[in-house]
Amino acid sequence: MTEHIDHTLRGRWTTTAGPLPPHALKWLRERTGLGEVRTPARAPVAPESALGDAARTALGEVVGPGYVRVDPDSRLGRAGGLSYVDLLRQRGDGEPAVPDAVVLPASPEQVVEVLEVCVEHDVAVVPFGGGTSVVGGVNALRGDKAAVVALDLNRLDKLVEVDPVSRLAVLQAGLPAPKAERLLAAHGLTIGHVPQSYERATIGGFAATRSAGQASAGYGRFEDMVEGVRLATPVGEWRLGGAPASAAGPDLKQLVVGSEGAFGVITEVALRVRRRPEVERYEGFVVDGWERGSALVREVAQRRVPADVTRLSDVDETEVSLALGGGWKVNALKGYLKARGVREPCLLVLGWHGASKREVARRRAETLRGVEALSLGKALGEAWRHGRFNGPRQRDALMEVGVCVETLETATHWSKVSDLRAAVREALVDALGRCVVMCHISHVYETGASLYFTVLAARDAADPIGQWQVAKAAASEAITGLGTISHHHAVGADHAPYLEAEIGRLGLDVLASVKRTLDPTGVLNPGKLLAGDIGAAGLASPGDR
């Protein structure tokens, strides 16, 4: 078996990212005060495994002894996700939460048996797919348990079934997104779900976090694609979804989608799939000013003719894109925009998918009818498409030279978009001082849109983790009351303290009741989604608080 996780890669997204060019470093120093001092990296050390011999033996009897790993490399390879703080810990700033073992089941039935063993031996279980969480969703927290295991679903990587008539596909949860697309392509089908984490993320992770792909305006969010779910829980297996729509009570599969491993382990997902597009067209535009740009995107969304990919960068993000790009072409573009009277350029990328050039041309015309934006042609749009997974690679290069670089996201109604953007920017600047705060809209709806922020600041060498945690808390407080604490990154451990403000105490009680029913001893992903203490008797009932 070939494992897709290597602990040597956990401290970075890739080993192929090159250094920042001199002009980019010069710009960063001017804008953030970045100095020459870098934080030396040191390799993290895995503590001794606390998994008892009896539990280890019992787990080995389920999955095979070779698939219960306690070696440091395997455990460090599942020690956290890919947030800025996670990567700092992997570089030696602070200590990552390291699981006591890695368990690799080969079937949904084995997952159920693993959970039974963990309940018997009071071992916490953290489901692990691609490890791309940026909100602490896969951190190996153990709650009150004596040990914690990472339940790696890497071996559940099959396309189980394709129903071409209904356009449904059943996929196992550990299937990486690129492999899923290759398997479906053989049937002429696609999921159409391409978030920035696409290269590493898995089908189960998409479902567990309510993921949203870059083409969500055309294909929908991941929860819109889910027709059925197979869930392993400590009290047995639960299967949901048997029809395209139902009035048989509330839609319980949507209770599972987004549950982040706190209610059970998703082992299979039945998805709505579509024919693979024959033609894709991406095009770049520039709008003068954020307010004009957001109004333009809103008008297109409310006419129900958005492009499949609809992405608007604010002035700061556009500036950074041009500054880090450099070269004569960028300088020529800047001159062209100035000559056309564009004072506050905001880059707009639109992308259409279709069965033919005629269909794409028709949809493009519908989107652009009445739109006042300066077209920069297909070259810029294609450049974005080909580089759309480069963000994490650029983060690696930025971190190497001492930059604090992280993202956060939210969503709100159109009437609050500008207020929310301003509030988050102000909170981050107040917390970080001299910094660059970028924002873009990447998911649009008739009633509102997502806002995705990227922050650049000189890293505090004395306390880099604390520096970002203070800033993230300030931004989260600014979001609360104006937007959702998470549009597509999920709750994890980082956002759990803010969930009550969004769904209310009664909402937390409802989730806790579900948790008690499906996971009565609290072994599943402690500290995620629900921030309350989880003891041996499970979450306290509302009356016990």
Image: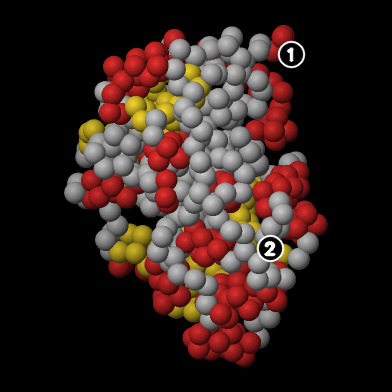
Q: Residue at x 49, y 23 (%)?
A: 50
**Disc 2 versus disc 1: nearer the observer:** 2
Q: Neighbour class for label 1 at 10 Å: few (<14), some, many (≥20)?
A: few
Image location (x, y in percent) of residue 291: 69, 66
Mark seen at residue 457 = 2
* Viewer can see residue 17: yes
Outermost right residue: 430
C-alpha distance separating marks 2 and 1: 41 Å
**Which of the image's four quarters has the N terminus?**
top left
Q: Is residue 26 above or below residue 243?
A: below
Where residue 536 sits, quadrant-wise, is: top right
Q: Residue at x 55, y 87 (%)?
A: 331
Write down the residue under mark 1.
545
Q: Is residue 229 visible?
A: no
Tag 1 secondary structure: loop
Which residue does the image show at 52% across and 77% down from the upper left?
Answer: 21
Amino acid type at circle 2 is Ala
Q: x%, y% of residue 241? A: 37, 25
Left or right: 447 as drawn, with respect to 159: right
Q: Position of residue 335 (x, y in %)?
A: 59, 89
Image quadrant where residue 165 sits: top left
Residue kind at label 1, given as amino acid type: Arg
Local crowd size for mark 2, using a 10 Å CA cut-off: few (<14), some (14–19), many (≥20): many
Vertical arrangement, residue 300 with respect to residue 409, above or below: below
Q: Position of residue 197 (x, y in %)?
A: 45, 51
